[in-house]
Image (spheres, rainbow, N blue to C red):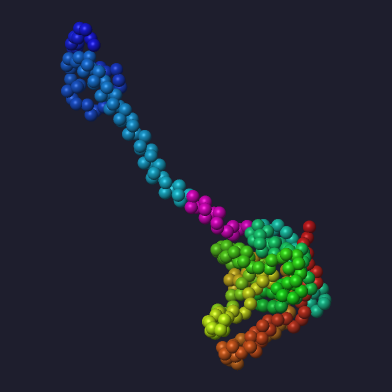
Amino acid sequence: MLQNPKILQTSCCVKLPSPKLPPILPPQLAQCCNFSRRELTILSNSSLLLLLSSNVVEPFIPKARAEESYPDTARNDQQEENKITSPNCSNTYVTKRAFLDISIDRQPVGRIVIGVYGEAAPAGATRFSGLVSGAAGISYRRKEFIKIMPNYVQHGGVRSFGVDAELAQKTGSNLAVERLINEWERESKCAGIKNLAGTVSLIVRDPLKPPPKMKLIARGGKLEIDEEQVGTDPNGTEFVIATKDSPELDASNLVIGRVLEGMEVVERLGQVKTVQENTSSPYFKVAKLIGDKRAVVAERGFNRPYSKVTVTNCGLME
């Protein structure tokens, strides 16, 4: 406490030691008048509070701006996620080279060199490379081309029954197509034709397979309705070499490589005479409609080569 409180008289306006007063101060405080020390202290404290409050409000402005930028950040995160999950449609880098020696009616016609896309389709490339090299216990060697179409030639692959199946079981090879179908679904998201002239692809599904039929069966002394599967699914070992652009194959085939050398050999295979297709015949249409097995057998023989087109030797190149 001051022993001798005195009123300080000033002949001019009071100049506060703090920064400039905010414009919200009452006008009477800016007038020339007499102030006590207590009044000066209160006035200084109130001015300090006003300055602090004005500084506290400012940090909220960047927060609001940051909140406005959140949608952009979320959009960027979504784009990065799409990049990870979306397929790399331009990743056609050749990681391995395979060869197929071809003969027609036991007469050698040349060699086909295939570049395998190990990064674009790793599961399909591993399947094809294992069958070419024989590492899976089974191989394309001495297996035939079973279909010659105007736009492509189709190899029969290996069988999922008999000797091939027994060898696959001994080596622990898996001929399932689940992983191949997953890669095919990812590849199908890419725009444009996948099976271009010269590409090599594995057949992973049958687009012509009819839907399952319902049939009545007896189980445990009771009659139940069950689905009857018509036709068999491919085992993922049959491969196709396109002689021309074949968009019809995009619905069933997984592209795993392309022909690097020997395209003239592929074109020669495409000129081999085949069984004429007769699907336009009214007799065939009626037999197909009523489910005549003779029509099914005849359909399997369409476009089969009269000559024996075989892979005499195959393997991986260094």
Identity of the residue drawn at 38% across and 45% down = 68
Residue 122 relative to residue 77: left or right = right
Residues drawn in magenta: 77-92
Q: Is residue 302 above or below residue 96?
A: below
Quadrant containing the N terminus is top left
Q: Residue furthest front?
A: 221
Q: Residue 66 versus residue 99: which sits nearer the camera?
A: 66
* Residue 113 colored in magenta in the image: no
Kindly tell me whether residue 67 is visible in this rendering.
Answer: yes
Magenta span includes 82: yes
In this view, the residue farthest toward the bottom is 283
The extreme top residue here reads 4
Q: Which residue is drawn at 28% across and 27% down?
A: 50
Task: Return the x and y of residue 276 as percentages of the image width and height.
Answer: 67, 85
**Count of picture labels:** 0
Q: Quadrant of residue 206?
A: bottom right
Q: In which quarter of the image is residue 308?
A: bottom right
Expressed as whole percent of the image width and height from the top left, the position of residue 235 reads 67, 71
Can residue 111 be seen in the rendering of this structure?
A: no
The quadrant the C terminus occupies is bottom right
- Report the residue at 25% width, 24% height from top: 46
Q: Where is residue 98 in the image (x, y as percent from the top left)?
A: 75, 63
Up/down of 239 relative to 14, above or below: below
Q: Nearer the viewer, residue 215 or 25?
A: 215
Q: Residue at x 45, y 47 (%)?
A: 73
Q: Where is residue 129 in the image (x, y as percent from the top left)?
A: 73, 63
Q: In which quarter of the image is residue 287?
A: bottom right
Of the pair 116 and 198, the residue shown nearer to us: 116
